[in-house]
Image (cartoon, rainbow, N blue to C red):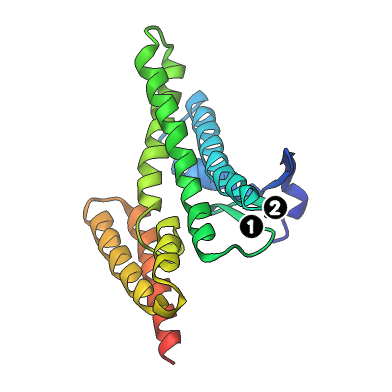
Amino acid sequence: MDTSALTLRFRIGSIPVAIEPWFWLTGILLGGNYVGPRIVLWLGVFFVSILVHELGHALAAQAFGAGARIRLYSFGGLTYPARPLSRWRNVAMTLAGPGAGFALGIAAFLFLRVSPFLTDTAHFTLQQLIWVNFGWGMMNLLPVPPLDGGHVLLGTLGRAHERTARIIGAVVAGLVAAWGLSTGSMYLGLMFGLLCWQNVQTVRAMQG
């Protein structure tokens, strides 16, 4: 289905941002326990958190002399540097995304701690910002391609050891998927199960 007409486009400074309609559907599904005003607040947290994460990548790319564009889609967000970066600059750009998210999470945590009087709405929003930016941020740093932690692993080991990195990613993803399914977290189990399968297929293709 062509959804280009429904894609929201704008710029943050010199950085183009495109938000596909499936991004919002994913947010609604992930916030399935919330109704009424809370689902709107959740979508705001979901949007801001992922955008800040991708801005971390994009601003790092700009710092290294490359432009970048951001795409928010059904599986979260992607940042596209305008040109390839060197190996270690690419690792630094990758880490800048989670770093930006952790900074947002710390800001929300400090605001929650120092503000004596908060409405239920503000309290809920800050708690969700902390959870998303720390919880999802740590999960995103697992050494599983194509997560950020997987890109860091690939960059650290180098192209000559990509097969090793993919095997590590498949094992870690499989363990997380098994844990998710055993604890009743179907989304976690399915997501990491898919990541495990993708890395296994990549290893097989490299052997062929």
* Residue 110 drawn at (x, y percent): 38, 21
Q: Is residue 89 visible?
A: yes
SS under mark 1? strand
Q: Identify which residue, 7 or 39, lies in the foreground.
A: 7
Q: In the image, what residue occupies the spot 43% across and 25% down?
A: 108
Residue ID for mark 1: 80
* 1 vs 2, front mark: 2
Instruction: Measure the alpha-carbon separation of dots 1 and 2.
Output: 8 Å
Q: Is residue 31 visible?
A: no
Q: Which mark, residue 117?
A: none
Residue ID for mark 2: 67
* Mark 2 Cα shell of 10 Å, populated few (<14), some (14-19), many (≥20): some
Q: Identify which residue, 158 or 5, lies in the foreground.
A: 158
Seen as rendered, the residue at the extreme bottom is 208
Q: In the image, what residue occupies the spot 46% across and 39% down?
A: 101
Q: Which circle's residue, 1 or 2, is located before the other in the chain?
A: 2
Q: In the image, what residue occupies the spot 40% across and 73% down?
A: 199
Q: Amino acid at mark 1?
A: Tyr
SS under mark 2? loop
Relative to residue 75, is residue 180 drawn left or right?
left
Q: In the image, what residue occupies the spot 56% across and 64% down?
A: 86
